[in-house]
Amino acid sequence: MNNELQPHKRKLSRGPRAVSGRNRDFGRRFRLPALTCVCLLVFYCHLGLYAQDAKLIDLSAELEPVCKQAAMPALGAAVICDGRLCAAGVVGVRKYGSDVKAELGDPFHLGSCTKAMTGSLIGLLAQQGKLRWDMTLEEAFPELKDTMHPDYRAVTLTHLLSHRAGLPQMTAGFELISREQLEEILAMPSPAAQRRCMAEIVLSRPPVRKPGEEMLYSNAGFALAGAIAEKAAGEDYESLVKRMLFEPLGMNSAGFGAMGTSGRIDAPWQHTKAGDKITPIEPGPDSDNPPFLTPGGRVHCSICDWAKYVQCVLKALRGEEGLLPAAEVRQLKEPPFGGDHALGWTICERDWAHGRAFTHAGTNKQNYCIVWIAPARNFAVLVATNRGGEDAFGPLDKLCAQMIARFLKDAP
């Protein structure tokens, strides 16, 4: 079992910040005859619909060389232009060494890019009056008041979702949880019960940092936020995020944990890389991080379904009416503790974005993905592979830069 959920570890300055416009092909766009374009537009406007996959630009030609050169089993990407999915592609194979081709509808593991979805779920529950952003741990878990460390009592949901709660990271292990306690947690019948038990253990220990004063990236914080959501709604996190996010957005491929079925190659397998050796990981209950960490990093879905969620965030950041509540957007635009992290996003300035960009990366060391959103440009790019390893970041980062240069004509 691999228990690392990594944050966006690279310096943001080296990502798609300086995208060279030299020798880039900006000319390729929709090439339907004009009359056909007009007819399609009138048809979809008449129905009040927009077909997300209508005449998508196929990115396979750009993805193939990256997939091969970076030794990635499969690679997927999607681009959102003018708020709509305009380009997508998936290349490679589901399992390294097999000839089973990866497909556009195949799910990819999102790792820590799940955190933004948890932030959105909390926002939706707050909008319904079931939670408050300033709800404290003492309010959320009054039954733990006698065992909760005093320094945690005033910690709020906003602290948890901003990595400011002083909780252990749980990115490369399970700090403050003994092996015996971990076995007890994993033996519990449901992820919700696991999260509840984890909360009891972790909150009884002193914080590893003073809450509120220092950012410390923490998967435990998002797991606790998921436990609070469960308690407030009377429904487990997995059901909540399906009902309140995946179903309204039509994310039919979304699920949790490793993709696919044990003994079959019906979805992309996860892979590790050590030196030049790539090892496929057969799907199963122990081939991903434990279920109690789902709110911090265990969602999987197709690249196009992930784009549906990213579109939703993009629309909200632009002040357009949609699924996400305004209160969540305010916290994204003005991180409550300053700095550059809020609700599962890292916030930075980029010239090509004409201002603020929102980004995050996700990996469980067996997969890797990156997303960038530029609200001022009504643009986003997302990429994913079913291979982990530190050397996966660079090629994915360059691919994002390539997509930015192609689809934003004035990218520097």
Image (cartoon, helix red, strand yellow):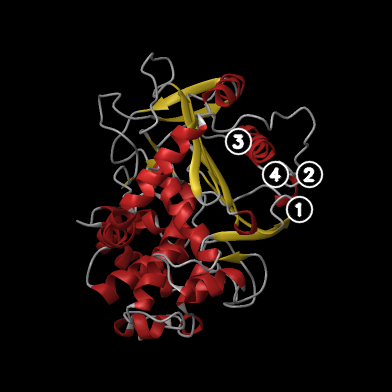
Question: Residue at image x 28%, y 63%?
Answer: 240
Q: CA distance from mark 1 to mark 3?
A: 20 Å
At numbered mark 3, what does the secondary structure look like: helix, strand or loop? helix
Of the residues under marks 4 and 3, which one precedes in the sequence?
4
At numbered mark 2, what does the secondary structure look like: helix, strand or loop? loop
| Percent of width and height locating residue 30 | 54, 33
**Which class describes the residues within 10 Å of circle 2: few (<14), some (14-19), or many (20+)?**
some
Q: CA distance from mark 4 to mark 1?
A: 10 Å
Of the residues under marks 4 and 1, which one precedes in the sequence?
4
Q: CA distance from mark 2 to mark 3?
A: 19 Å
Of the residues under marks 2 and 1, which one precedes in the sequence?
1
Query: Which tag is nearer the camera, tag 4 or tag 3?
Result: 4
Frontmost residue, 6 versus 399: 399
Identify residue type, mark 3: Leu
Count the numbered circles shown.
4
Q: Are marks 2 and 1 in contact (CB under 8 Å)?
A: yes
Q: Which residue is mark 3?
A: 396
Q: Which residue is mark 2?
A: 412
The dot on residue 192 is: none
Q: Which residue is mark 1?
A: 351
